[in-house]
Image: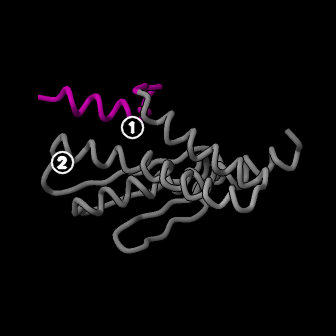
Amino acid sequence: MSISLLLHLLFVVAPISTVLHEAGHIIGAKSLNADRMRLTIGSGTIVRTFFISKVQITIRAIFFLGGLASSERKNMYKPYELIWIALCGPLTNGFVAFLLYIIYTAYPSNYLLLLLLFNLWIGIINLVPFRFKEKQSDGYTIVKALTQK
């Protein structure tokens, strides 16, 4: 991989794909009338926080390193609603990957291919149930909701 592709992956592809994934969760929560939603991009020191509609958006200094979406509602979410919100992130990445594939077939580019593959990877890997310290994948959230009584 060339240095320009690596930099493109780190500073363009990863943040865009993460924003799309987390925005998918926010769209899912909004569709279920969430009262409060938060979207955080990156880690480290907070650079900027602002609101768009009912969504608090926080950008952190290391913007290319992960993201998180959360939502709250007066009435607790039912298990199927938690599943819907969890699925909306990977579904968004899958949909974006599909659109990028269509564009890539007409306008092939290594940069576009990298964006396509990274979105596909985020969509698939987040469906695998795993937990690491305090973070859990969407797949883990889904399994947890399915096994709730």
| For residue 29, above or below residue 120 | below
Residue at the spot of label 1 = 138
Question: Of label 1 and label 2, which has the lower sequence position?
Answer: 2
Residue at the spot of label 2 = 77
Q: Of the residues shown, which amino acid type is indicated by label 1?
A: Asp
Residue 98 lies, in percent from the top left, at 54, 53
Q: Are marks 1 and 2 in contact (CB under 8 Å)?
A: no
**57 sits left or right of 3 in the view:** left
The residue shown at (43%, 71%) is 51
Please tell me whether residue 136 belongs to the stretch shown in magenta: yes
The residue shown at (71%, 47%) is 114
Residue 28 lies, in percent from the top left, at 32, 56
**111 sits left or right of 89 in the view:** right
The residue shown at (71%, 49%) is 113
Residue 137 lies, in percent from the top left, at 42, 34
Residue 101 lies, in percent from the top left, at 62, 53
Q: Of the residues shown, which amino acid type is indicated by label 2?
A: Tyr
| Mark 2 crowdedness (10 Å alpha carbons): few <14, some 14-19, many ≥20 | some
Q: Residue reaching furthest bottom?
A: 53
| Secondary structure type for disc 1 | helix
| Secondary structure type for disc 2 | loop
**99 sits left or right of 142 in the view:** right
Looking at this view, is 40 or 121 the one in front? 121
| For residue 51, above or below residue 21 | below
The quarter of the rendered structure image containing the C terminus is top left
Q: What range of the chain is rendered magenta?
A: 129-149
| Mark 1 crowdedness (10 Å alpha carbons): few <14, some 14-19, many ≥20 | many
- Foreground mark, 1 or 2, reads 1
**32 sits left or right of 88 in the view:** left
